[in-house]
Amino acid sequence: MTEVFQLHPEPDQYSFTFGGKEPILTVPPGSVIELSTEDCYGGQVRSVDDLPSVVCKFPFLNPVTGPIAVEGAEPGDILAVHLAEVRPRRDWAVSSTFPHFGALTTTHTTAMLHDALEERVWMYEIDAEAGTCRFSARNSDYVVDLPLDPFHGTIGVAPDAFERIVTVTPSFHGGNMDTPETRARATVYFPVFVDGAHLSLGDGHCRQGEGEVCGTAVEAAMATTIVVDLIKGSAPIATPRIEDDRFIMTTGSVRPLEDAFRLSQTELIRWTESLTGMDTLDAYQLVSQAGLAPAGNVVDTNYTMVAKLPKTVLDGASVWDDVHARLRRTGEEHLRGR
């Protein structure tokens, strides 16, 4: 019988790093975990007058729920995390521009003589039943309902070599990748670097355009259900991978952006080789003609690119004995019986 765990942290239990913190929950492989997360502002921005630079305290931004230790996880294993449900916990969400954060403004690493963009807050109305989040312009009466597409912008494991990495940074451990591909009904695969893996997640987004251009999505607290499992005996993976019913996906989170692109594409080609038995150049050709390359983020301390390949071109190849389909069924059965 599937074990079900609850994890609903108190404010002082949230983490702001990957690595360097003891687990607050330990579960066996195959477990279902129902958990709650806070938004990237720590719930402090509640109106258009709450400027993040005033109400939020750096570096206590982007809190995550965890770490969660998975029994038996060892370095070299792969942690599979199926996102069964990602649901907004409130009927409102927030986005903002920061003076020195975003793709189209001066930042601390992109120094310019002109002033940074204005700090401004937008409040979104969330209607989970209708599946919409309402954008309202601040300086006009323009209003439009956007489709709700919730996901976790930050999800990852403890990094290697005793590192502690702040939650706003994506890297080989996952972290703040900000890709909408980590939505409900997707399975995310992480390389395990420490005993227990130490999974954490947060930074819920009601939706986000590719690239997260202004630096923030439609930021929200989430009620999330996940299923975790271990893959042992497989060749290790270098970066997080994602699978849903239609695609296999790989990630690259580095700077500059072209190297993030190269890393994600190289990993997808390697994965395609292993699934099909093709050599490198044949896999390179297939990915070149059938692949997609959405941007996760072009704003964080590292950039994230995603490489996607439709499963229809893989001739029915099984990914780790169909672990995604098995975990999806477990999640669906749990949600139906809840």
Image (cartoon, rainbow, N blue to C red):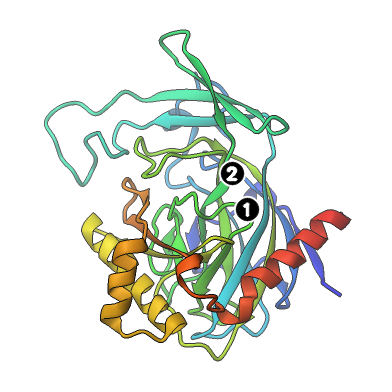
Q: Position of residue 244 (x, y in %)?
A: 57, 61
Q: Are marks 1 and 2 in contact (CB under 8 Å)?
A: yes
Residue 214 position, x and y percent, is 35, 35
Is 63 on the left or on the right of 96, as rendered? right
Query: Which residue is located at x 59 percent, y 36 percent?
Result: 148
Q: Which residue type does callout 2 highlight?
A: Pro
Whether 222 is drawn above or below 95: the answer is below
Q: Is any part of residue 69 visible from this angle?
A: yes
* Residue at 32% across, 45% down: 299
The image quarter containing residue 198 is bottom right
Q: Quadrant of the N terminus?
A: bottom right
Q: How many marks?
A: 2
Residue 315: percent from the left, percent from the top?
50, 75
Q: SS for tag 2?
A: loop
**Front residue (pair 242, 300):** 242
Residue in the foreground of this view, choosing between 189 and 144 = 144
Q: Residue reaching furthest left? A: 113
Q: Which residue lies at the image location 43% right of the left edge and 67% below the top edge?
A: 164
Residue for point 28% across, 26% down = 117
Instruction: Determine the secondary structure under disc 1.
Output: loop
The residue nearer to you, when weighing 205 against 70, is 205
Q: Judge from the rendering whether residue 120 lies leftward or rightward of residue 126; answer left or right.
A: left
Give the residue type at disc 1. Answer: Ala
Is residue 25 visible in this depiction of the protein?
no
Mark 1, residue position? 184
Residue under label 2, please give it: 150
